[in-house]
Amino acid sequence: MLEKNLRLLMESVDEVAMDANKFVNFQRQLQKQNMLKQQHIQKRVSNTGIWDVMSFQLGIKVKMAIANLATSIKPE
């Protein structure tokens, strides 16, 4: 009877150890996935920021060109 209980206890401990390993692996994968997600977000933000600056500068140049064109055209 004692041997049977000891065997069952050992099996249960093995199952708990396997579940703990699965959980640790899951946590690692989740951490890696979150890190990749943050890197992707930061990359998009930095790229978007560059495009925003470039489009802002282009917008200023276009507005200046329109203003220059408007002043150079004189109504008759």
Image: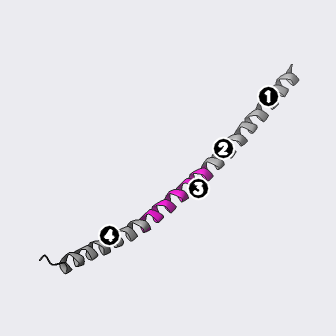
Residue indicated by mark 4: 59
Residue 71, compared with residue 47, is above or below; it is below
Residue indicated by mark 3: 36
- For mark 4, does the 10 Å Cα neighbourhood hold few (<14), some (14 to 19), or many (20 or more) residues? few
How much space separates mark 2 and mark 3, taking CA atoms?
A: 15 Å
How much space separates mark 1 and mark 3, taking CA atoms?
A: 41 Å
Residue indicated by mark 2: 26
Side of 22 where 64 appears, left or right: left
Q: Nearer the viewer, mark 1 or mark 3?
A: 3
Q: Position of residue 47 (x, y in %)?
A: 47, 65
How much space separates mark 2 and mark 4, taking CA atoms?
A: 48 Å
Residue indicated by mark 1: 9
Q: Nearer the viewer, mark 3 or mark 4?
A: 4
Kind of residue sitting beneath label 2:
Phe
Provide the residue span drawn in magenta.
31-50
- For mark 3, does the 10 Å Cα neighbourhood hold few (<14), some (14 to 19), or many (20 or more) residues? few
Tell me whether circle 2 and circle 4 mark residues in contact (CB < 8 Å): no
Front one among 53 and 46:
53
Label 3 secondary element: helix
Kind of residue sitting beneath label 3:
Leu
Kind of residue sitting beneath label 1:
Leu
Rendering quarter of residue 14: top right
Q: Nearer the viewer, mark 1 or mark 2?
A: 2
Kind of residue sitting beneath label 4:
Gly
Residue located at (24% from left, 77% from top): 69
Rendering quarter of residue 13: top right
Side of 10 where 36 appears, left or right: left
Tell me whether circle 1 and circle 2 mark residues in contact (CB < 8 Å): no
Q: Nearer the viewer, mark 2 or mark 4?
A: 4
